[in-house]
Amino acid sequence: MANMPQDVGKEAVQAKGWIGAHKWLILRRISQLGILAAFVAGPWFGLWIVKGNLAYSYTLDVLPLTDPYILLQSMISGVTPETVAVIGVAIVLVFYALVGGRVYCSWVCPVNMVTDAASWLRRKLGIRGASHAARSTRYWILALTLILPLITGGIVWELVNPVSIMFRGIVFSMGLAWILILAIFLFDLLVSRDGWCGHYCPVGAFYSLLSNHAVVRVTAINREACDDCMDCFNVCPEPQVIKPALKGAPKGIGPVITGNQCTNCGRCIDVCAVDVFQFGNRYSKASTSGLGSAENYSKHTV
């Protein structure tokens, strides 16, 4: 029997304890705050663990990391990248190709903490209304951000990118950045469930394209135990990716969540009281059976 959205995770807390029902959420917050701490340690305390920003950084003066989305926009605008930037992109691309590009959204992006807070409060207040913008809208915005550098000769998106603005605000002083962050929070809270990340953000759209063949996946390995409580659907920022893996057995679809919009946030694992989900890989039990069908099933049944 389906639970109310306000009650998401209550059964999991009873079954696994509070920490067990929030394990992956806690680890994500440690990751996000830890990354921010590594960046601010330099300008705040003179401890230069990481130099740079989320677009381009040096860790311990050894490891270069470059945002492939930013570099692509730079190249389109006419900039020739330095060798070290290309090396940094290669490292990032290999990492995200293995673990799933949208882990950036749930494990790195600071804006995720804002949108998660809005989603949590939205459930607690029982707010149901939502806009009906297609999730494909973010891909149209992504295309626009790649066309504008060609026309203008500059990375136009970075002028309004909430991720970059919030990062600079945290490091140097929020100032007017609070207005943009508050606007995203209120939009997700009052207008559209998971509206910014799920429908409009081109950064998430770009990184989803790196997830098509990622090895690390959430799997509904114990889907026979599902009691239809709906907690996983209510907590997931991309609920359309769950149904094929969870309910696709009669169609020969394997238990692996193959949708490239999945952020590997692990909240479906946390909130499931009967442990239907776990982290695995795309080759997990019966995952290759009906892989193409799973993607097709997702498009036509959700």
Image (cartoon, rainbow, N blue to C red):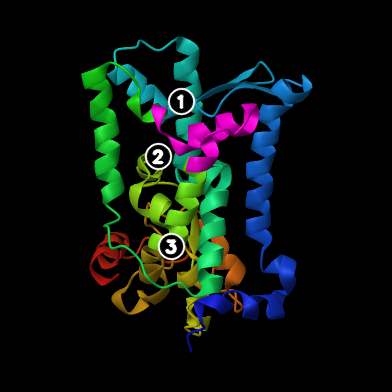
Secondary structure beneath dot 1 equals helix
What residue is at 50 percent from the left and 22 percent from the top? Answer: 88
Kind of residue indicated by mark 3: Leu
| Mark 3 vs mark 2: in front | 3
Comparing labels 1 and 3, the label whose residue is closer to the camera: 3
Residue 73, percent from left and from top: 34, 24
Secondary structure of the residue carrying numbered label 3: helix
Which of the two labelled residues, at mark 3 and mark 2, occupies the earlier sequence position?
3
Q: Nearer the viewer, residue 292 or 58?
A: 58
- Reading the image, the residue beneath label 1 is 90
- Residue at 42 percent across and 34 percent down: it is 161
x and y percent of residue 105 in the render?
49, 46
- The residue type indicated by label 1 comes to Ala
**Which image quadrant: the C terminus?**
bottom left
- For the magenta stretch, what is the residue range? 159-179
Q: Is residue 192 visible?
A: no
Labels 3 and 2 touching (C-beta < 8 A): no
Within the magenta stretch, is there residue 268?
Answer: no
Mark pair 3, 2: CA separation? 22 Å
Assess disc 2: are there few (<14), some (14-19) or many (≥20) residues with their C-alpha within 10 Å of its C-alpha.
Answer: many
Q: Nearer the viewer, residue 251 or 175?
A: 175
Taking the view exactly as shown, the residue that stands out farthest to the bottom is 1
The residue pinned by badge 3 equals: 190
Earlier in the chain: of badge 1 and badge 3, it is: 1
Judge left or right: residue 126 versus residue 40.
left
Task: Say which residue label 2 marks.
Answer: 203
In the image, residue 270 lies at what x, y percent? 61, 67
Question: Disc 1 or 2, which lies upstream in sequence?
Answer: 1
Determine whether, in the image, residue 82 is placed left or right of residue 29.
Answer: left
Circle count? 3
Is there a contact, CB below 8 Å, between mark 1 and mark 2?
no
Question: What secondary structure is the stretch in magenta mostly built from?
Answer: helix
